Amino acid sequence: MAENGEGVNAREAVSKAKDYLKEMLGIYPNDAKLEEIELSDDGIWIITLSYKEGVAFSGIDVIKYKIIEIEADTGEVISMKIRKV
């Protein structure tokens, strides 16, 4: 809970999103980078995380993006989606 007792703050939401990424995909929190965060009008944290997923044949890093939605009141993860670039 946030210090003010009013749900999950941005820092806590990002931490929960990174923990969820580890739980579901095995991506460790230190390997995930925060790209975007937004609190929607209906109280949902929308968090975009990126992580490196190997190297392409061309030698360029393959970067994947996930959008994780978290309920701001409870901290519950609602969804995880692929973000197309």
Image (cartoon, rainbow, N blue to C red):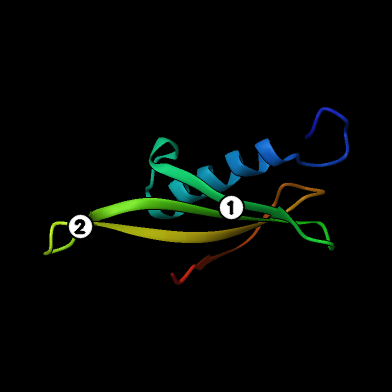
Q: Which amino acid type is shown beneath numbered disc 2?
A: Ile
Residue 78 lies in quadrant: bottom right
- Residue, x 58% and y 52% (percent of image)? 36
Question: CB atoms at circles 2 and 1 under 8 Å apart?
Answer: no
Looking at this view, name the residue that lies furthest to the top: 3
Task: Specify few, some or many for label 1: CA neighbours under 10 Å numbering under 14, 14-19, or 20 or more.
Answer: few
Residue 36: assigned label: 1
Marked residue nearer the N-terminal end (2 or 1): 1
Instruction: Give x and y (percent) for residue 11.
Output: 66, 36
> As drawn, is 82 to the left or to the right of 71?
left
* Count of residue discs: 2
Q: Residues within 10 Å of mark 2 (few under 14, many from 20)?
A: few
Quadrant of the image for the N terminus? top right
Instruction: Say which quarter of the image contains residue 39.
Output: bottom right
What residue lies at 60% left-to-right and 43% top-to-bottom?
Answer: 14
User: Considering only vertical position in the picture, is 19 above or below 63?
Assistant: above
Identify which amino acid the numbered label 1 is placed on. Glu
Q: Which mark is residue 60?
A: 2
Give me the residue at 11% from left, 64% from top: 57
Instruction: Report the quarter where the C terminus lies.
Output: bottom left
- Local secondary structure at mark 1: strand
Instruction: Answer left or right for 26 relative to 57.
Output: right
**Element under disc 2:** loop
Q: Residue at x 66, y 43 (%)?
A: 13
Q: CA distance from mark 2 to mark 1?
A: 23 Å
**Residue at the outermost bottom position:** 84
**Residue 15 in the image: x percent, y percent?**
59, 38
